[in-house]
Amino acid sequence: MTQASGAQQATEKSLEAMRKFSETYAQRTGTYFCSDLGTTAVVIEGLAKHKDDLGAPLCPCRYYEDKEAEVAAAYWNCPCVPMRERKECHCMLFLTPDNPFAGDQQTITVDQIRTETDKF
């Protein structure tokens, strides 16, 4: 499968792993997915793609000169240090209930992710 932009999608195995991780982490930390399902889907897809390509779920919302070095440093591997320490998610995947962009969901299906990411 390819996206309209020609970018290869993450494998089903990595996508499912990142979906499950995201749900579990949101529930464990009392955070919620973005009210815009597309944002949640794109971030989970990006994490899964990095897991496929780099072996770790490197934050997909940042630019890196050297992705392999960033994976080794682990600072931006999800959940990143700012999220673990202060519940600050740059990607807007894990949002505290007081965040104006927080939705009320802590779950998402693979079909929802694929439907949203296929729009691009």
Image: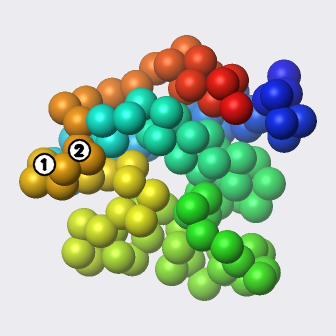
- Can residue 17 be seen here? The reply is no
Amino acid carrying label 2: it is Ala
Callout 1 secondary element = loop
Amino acid carrying label 1: it is Pro
Quadrant position of residue 87: bottom left
Callout 2 secondary element = loop
**Residue appearing at x 60%, y 50% in the figure:** 47
Q: Position of residue 115 (x, y in %)?
A: 59, 18
Residue on which the image places disc 2: 102
Q: Is residue 14 above or below residue 92?
A: above
Q: Residues within 10 Å of mark 1 (few under 14, many from 20)?
A: some
**Residue appearing at x 60%, y 84% in the figure:** 73
**Residue appearing at x 33%, y 42% in the figure:** 34
Q: Is residue 27 above or below residue 82?
A: above
Q: CA distance from mark 2 to mark 1?
A: 6 Å
Q: Determine the residue located farthest toward the right in the rendered image.
A: 6
Q: Position of residue 90 (x, y in %)?
A: 41, 65
Which label sits on residue 53? none
User: How many numbered tags mark residues here?
Assistant: 2
Q: Quadrant of the C terminus?
A: top right
Residue on which the image places disc 1: 97
Report if the CB atoms under discs 2 and 1 are less than 8 Å apart: yes
- Can residue 46 be seen here? The reply is yes
Left or right of 109 on screen, residue 117: right
